[in-house]
Amino acid sequence: MSDGEASCEVADPQESVPSKETPAISYPVKVLYCPECSLPLEYCEFMPDAVQQRCRAWREKNQDLLSQEGVDIAALNLDDSDSANKKRQKRGGRGNVKAKQKKEPDVVKLARIPRGKRKFVTRVTGLATFDINLKKASKLFAQKFSCGSSVSGDDEIIIQGDVTDDLIDLILETWNEIDEDHIEDLGEVKR
């Protein structure tokens, strides 16, 4: 062999496989699918409880069909007692956020925040206490004032530009549950 060539030796497949008794498998393998959850019958146990109950009911009705196909029903695990003891998997992320308790309608606060030398943004807080969808309100503000507007917190909308005077009129026109007593203009505020 030369320096640039690699040696390729092919091992005998009979030598590398241990000589254990393997069950005789006939190919192609026939897999039966559950019509309720559309998974192979062995995987029905991993479905939610409501789907498991439907799978269990289907198996009870079709035991003769399953036995004709050669399915070992005892090996399939869909016991009622097992699902009661099984803990549900908790999902991570925002799914675990607790629902916030609703409080009485508060005050909508408007503040003008300096953003540079002569530029400002307007911060609106308190709209969520009146059960107003903040994303829809932000989109309304952006369309009405032809500027950028975004939801930046639990109960905060930031609007580009100083639009506090026009914003008070727009809030009073759009949402009837908010009156002038519930709107407070804080003036210029540092972040």
Image: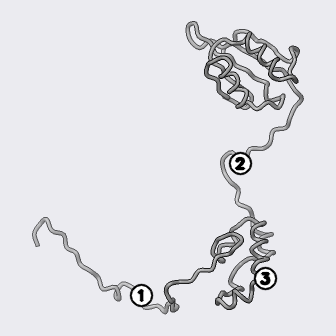
Q: Could you tell which of marks 2 and 1 lies nearer the N-terminus? A: 1
- Give the image quarter of residue 128: top right
CA gap, disc 2 and disc 1: 48 Å
- Residue at screen point 59% across, 10% down: 119
Which residue is most to the top?
118
Q: Residue 12: x percent and y percent?
A: 30, 86
174 or 25, nearer to the observer: 174
Q: Nearer the viewer, mark 2 or mark 1?
A: 2
| Image spot of residue 154 (x, y percent) | 73, 32
Q: Nearer the viewer, mark 2 or mark 3?
A: 3
Helix or strand or loop: what does disc 2 sit on? helix
Where in the figure is residue 172, as x and y percent of width and height? Answer: 82, 17
| Disc 2 to disc 3, C-alpha distance | 37 Å
Q: Which residue is mark 1?
A: 18
Q: Quadrant of residue 116?
A: top right
**Which numbered dot is residue 95?**
2
Q: Is 25 on the left or on the right of 133, as rendered?
A: left
Q: Residues within 10 Å of mark 2 (few under 14, many from 20)?
A: few
Name the amino acid type tagged 3: Lys
Mark 2 and mark 3 residues within 8 Å of each other at the beta carbon:
no
CB under 8 Å between discs 2 and 1: no
